[in-house]
Amino acid sequence: MFIIYDLIYLVAAIFYLPVFLWRKKCHAGFMQRLGILPRDLKLKAPIWIHAVSVGEVMSIRPLLEELRKIYPDKRFVISTVTPTGNKIARNIARNQDWVTYLPLDLSFIVSSVMEKIKPSLFILAETELWPNLITHLYQKGVPLIVVNARISDASFKGYLCIRFLLKNMLNKIHLFCVQTRRDSQRLIRLGVSENRIRITGNMKFDIHNYTGLRKDAKDLRPKLGIKPQEKFLVAGSTHTGEEEVILAAYKKLLVNFPDLRLLIAPRHPERTSEVQRLIQLSGFAAVRISQLSPSEASRSDKVAVFILDTVGELLSFYSIADVVFVGGSLVRKGGHNILEPAMFAKPVLFGPHMFNFRDIAELFLEQRAALLVKDTQELYLKIKDLLDNPSKIEFLTQRARDLLIANQGATQKNTQIIKDLCGRISTV
């Protein structure tokens, strides 16, 4: 079976290669994905934590800090898939840790990497299913724990179609620490034994240490030429079809708030030229953050709209915003993480398509801690209402703050579970 899987994976990788190159994802660390590691690498049975990208890396940071207390003599391997995640991982790693990329899930690559690293425990953030990786760890008797586990609507539909193939593999995972009861029920339907599941909550509620980001961001407003009295609207992680809505709402807002500034951060930076064209067609001057000079924003006689065309900096711009719209939600992409701007005490708006963050979005709306918008007119009216009424911003952010505090604690639960299950690794 795994020979067939390897062949399918390899063929898919070959066909995807042109897209991979076009999106400029062939980064310097890609050799690590091929299993090419330093010859002198000696880690002595480390704890390996994998987090695919920025959001997952940020969510495992508190867990990593807790595990360091329990296993002070252990080294940690932190792996990601994306370069942006890798960058954040390097910021939270210590000198004795090793930050790398997850090997491609081909049996011979996985086997080679695992024999080199020999982890004593493997922790997987959220729910990425890598059959060869899971099988190798199981055969070697290495505990594999999934933390912050979740099964999205789209994934669940697909997994149900191949349930007969997944059941055996899923039960090779020692434990799933899931976010919600819905996630638990979905895993059970996929064939996971109930005794392998614990409902512990969402660790993303436990992210609170943004000190470094705040320090890095303190000079951003002057760099953008935003004066103290001006307001700053950030539209984060936008997708095709959303920028037009945002720009139309912004044009209407400028009638009432001529000092309002806008930054659009497309989810995929390769769309920068497309977003730039839309901004110009809307009658604004487009200013790329990567090309920003102190006077860039004031060179044109047109109002400037900023484009975040770099990676790994969105959180810094959230931290200096006055109002935040989170994208992927006006179109059917499933939305993106609203906890990040909320943790900076920013009023958050999002669209109706939040199925990738359904539980969090529903919770925020139930607690009146965020605002739902469906189109240009609603986006305009609700932002206008917030800017006209600072007390409403305070109400919204206070509700969000209370909600965040009330839902914290998943990290501590997961830490205790890991300690109870794998206490012996401290002496490996």
Image: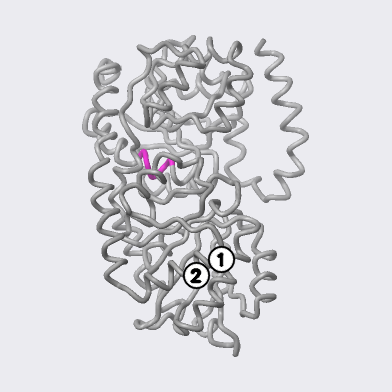
Residue 19 belongs to the span the image colors magenta = no
Residue 337, image x and y in percent?
Answer: 44, 48
Residue drawn at 44 percent across, 77 percent down: 223
Q: Position of residue 248 (x, y in %)?
A: 59, 71
Where is residue 6 drawn, in percent x and y?
69, 19
Pick out the residue farthest to the bottom: 301
Q: Work out whether 313 lies above or below 68.
A: below
The one nearer the camera, 275 or 218, is: 275
Left or right side of 193 for 378: right
Identify the residue position indicated by label 1 in the image.
376
Could you say which quadrant of the image residue 58 lies in?
top left
Magenta portion: prevailing SS class: helix
- The N terminus appears in which quarter of the rendering? top right
Front one among 224 and 352:
352
Extent of the magenta region: 56-60
Q: Secondary structure at mark 1?
A: helix
At 56% across and 61% down in the image, what residue appears?
375
Residue 312 seen: no
Q: At 26% from the left edge and 21% from the top edge, which residue is drawn?
A: 426
> From the image, which quarter does the C terminus lie in?
top left
Amino acid type, mark 2: Tyr
Residue 294 seen by the camera: yes
Depicted 193 relative to depicted 215: above or below? above
Query: In which quadrant of the rendered view does residue 29 lie?
Result: top right
User: Label 2 belongs to which residue?
Assistant: 380
Contact check, label 2 and label 1, Cβ < 8 Å = yes
Q: Identify the image's colour scheme: rainbow, by chain, secondary structure or one colour.
A: one colour
| Nearer to us in this view, 28 or 85 | 85
Image coordinates of residue 406 in percent, x first then y, are 23, 43
